[in-house]
Image (tube, helix red, strand yellow):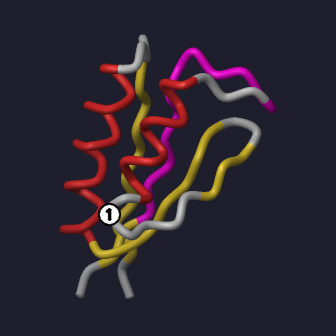
Amino acid sequence: MTRCTVNFVIEPFVEGSPGTHVVAGIRAMEARGLDVSMGPFGSTVAGPVDTVSSAISAMVDAAVKDGARRVLVEVVIDER
């Protein structure tokens, strides 16, 4: 099974005080069984490519519906 790591930022983003649009995006990822790690410059999640790719779509939809103005996503395929 191919895995990937995704780094993402939902903007506007204020460190220590994520807006409802950020929380909505993260909850969409968590609802698909993924553990999200929030950092000072964005968030990271890892898992099977098929699970993560569908979670990215749900995350973007949820964040935009809640007021996000920009969503930056980087996907790295883990070759193991």
Expressed as whole percent of the image width and height from the top left, the position of residue 34 reads 43, 67
Q: Residue extending furthest right?
A: 16
Expressed as whole percent of the image width and height from the top left, the position of residue 53 reads 23, 56
Expressed as whole percent of the image width and height from the top left, the position of residue 42 reads 62, 39
Q: Residue at x 75, y 27 (%)?
A: 17
- Using the image as rendered, state which of residue 47 and residue 35 is in the foreground: 35
Q: Residue at x 61, y 23 (%)?
A: 19
Residue 7 part of the magenta segment = yes
Crowd class of label 1 (few under 14; some 14 to 19; many from 20; radius 10 Å): few
Compared across the picture, whether 13 is left or right of 53 comes to right
Which amino acid lies under the numbered mark 1 shown in the image of this protein? Arg
Q: Quadrant of the N terminus?
A: bottom left
Disc 1 element: loop
Q: How many numbered circles does the render carry?
A: 1
Residue stretch rendered in magenta on the structure:
5-16
Where residue 67 sits, quadrant-wise, is top left
Expressed as whole percent of the image width and height from the top left, the position of residue 69 reads 42, 11
What residue is shown with label 1? 32
Residue 15 part of the magenta segment = yes
Compared across the picture, whether 39 is left or right of 63 comes to right
Q: Quadrant of the C terminus?
A: bottom left
Q: Residue at x 43, y 17 (%)?
A: 68
Compared across the picture, whether 46 is left or right of 65 comes to right
Q: Is residue 7 above or below residue 25?
A: below
Q: Residue at x 80, y 32 (%)?
A: 16
